[in-house]
Image (tube, helix red, strand yellow):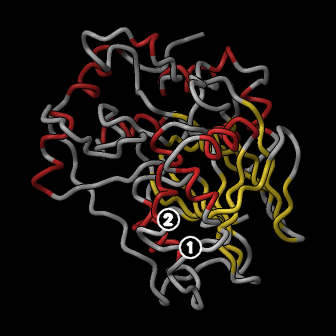
Amino acid sequence: MRSLIAWVGLGWLLFSCTPTPIEPEPAPTKEVELPTTPYLVVLGVAQDAGYPQAGCAKACCAEAWPNGRHEGPVSLGLVDPASESKYLFEATPDLPQQLERLNGYLDSGDGHTPDGVFLTHAHIGHYTGLMYFGREVQGAQQIPVYAMPKMTEFLTQNGPWSQLVALENIALRGLQGDSTQRLWESLAVTPFAVPHRDEFSETVGYEIQGPEKSALFIPDIDKWNRWNRDLAAEIKAVDYALVDATFFANGELPGRDMTEIPHPFVEETMNLLAELPASEKSKVIFIHFNHTNPLARGDSAAVALVQENGFRVAETGMVLPL
């Protein structure tokens, strides 16, 4: 299959030190026209550590520190205006800011707690925000936390998370792979297993089904050929596909064996889906950017390259009607 990216241009994209500054998306206001039916909103786009990454003084993060640029770890909000309910996908270290943003989408939101949290796996950017529900912070009462069996066991058996369970700050709601959890008549969520580094729990993606449209959410996965499903076929079955874009291309981490962290490169995903019609490519929304990924720093050339090939790049504040 023909390559979509010229390597000379790619090297410039990966290691250029001059990002195009992007101002953080403002919180919604009452003047913003939002769907009256359920929708997803992107609350974070970065890898677990956010952008810029702690301790990084390299070119990829150098401009972000003095400019106050920040991108939170990957997270989605699910909003149902009719029931005035809101759900989080992932409990990240940036949960306070992400929950505050999510609350802004509902006029009657209390700013305190979501109606539920769906977790994908036990890597730090995806569950550690649960700590903010504990007695040291909110002292929340029985926040529903939806998790797979090993993830449930991990939270129950290991402190400090076990204290959240014991004090009933959170109420664990067990999930099973490919078994649908119905939230409201018009909203359903289905987890499905994906291959990943499962040191402490299994890893899942989610299909989120609304009254009219549906979305795939796969923030973390190993190479696509390790999955027992066909990515192109899965994309054809939904309206949006938010997929793992941790790294742009091989060689992004000089001096490190990138097979140790086998995420699909953006380049690989674009090549894999190159023969899809434009209508299908436009469903693909890249998300979960490592701090070394030029998409994380808003590099206009990298974003343009993705868009020229028919795909999309997630941005905080992006709204996807369901």
Is 3 left or right of 253, judged from the image as shown?
A: right
- Residue displayed at 13% across by 46% down: 63
Q: Is residue 6 above or below residue 207?
A: above
Q: Is residue 283 visible?
A: no
Confirm or deny contact between disc 1 and disc 2 (CB under 8 A): yes
Q: Nearer the viewer, residue 175 or 188?
A: 175
Residue with the mark numbered 1: 140
Whole-angstrom CA distance, mark 1 to mark 2, is 6 Å
Is 156 left or right of 46, judged from the image as shown?
A: right
Q: Nearer the viewer, residue 140 or 321?
A: 140
Residue 258 numbered mark, or none? none
Q: Amino acid at mark 1?
A: Ala
- Residue displayed at 23% across by 24% down: 12
Would you call the spot at circle 2 few (<14 residues within 10 Å), some (14-19), or many (20 or more)? many
Q: Is residue 81 above or below residue 196?
A: below
Measured from the top left, where is residue 67 in percent x and y? 14, 57
**Quarter assignment of residue 301:** top left
Find numbered disc 2 in the image and state the secondary structure of the residue it sits on: loop
Is 288 left or right of 38, judged from the image as shown?
A: left
Q: Amino acid at mark 2?
A: Gly
Measured from the top left, where is residue 147 in percent x and y? 71, 47
Would you call the spot at circle 1 few (<14 residues within 10 Å), some (14-19), or many (20 or more)? some
Residue with the mark numbered 2: 134
- Residue displayed at 82% across by 66% down: 183
Quarter of the image where the C terminus is located = bottom right
Q: Is residue 249 visible?
A: yes
Quarter of the image where the N terminus is located = top right
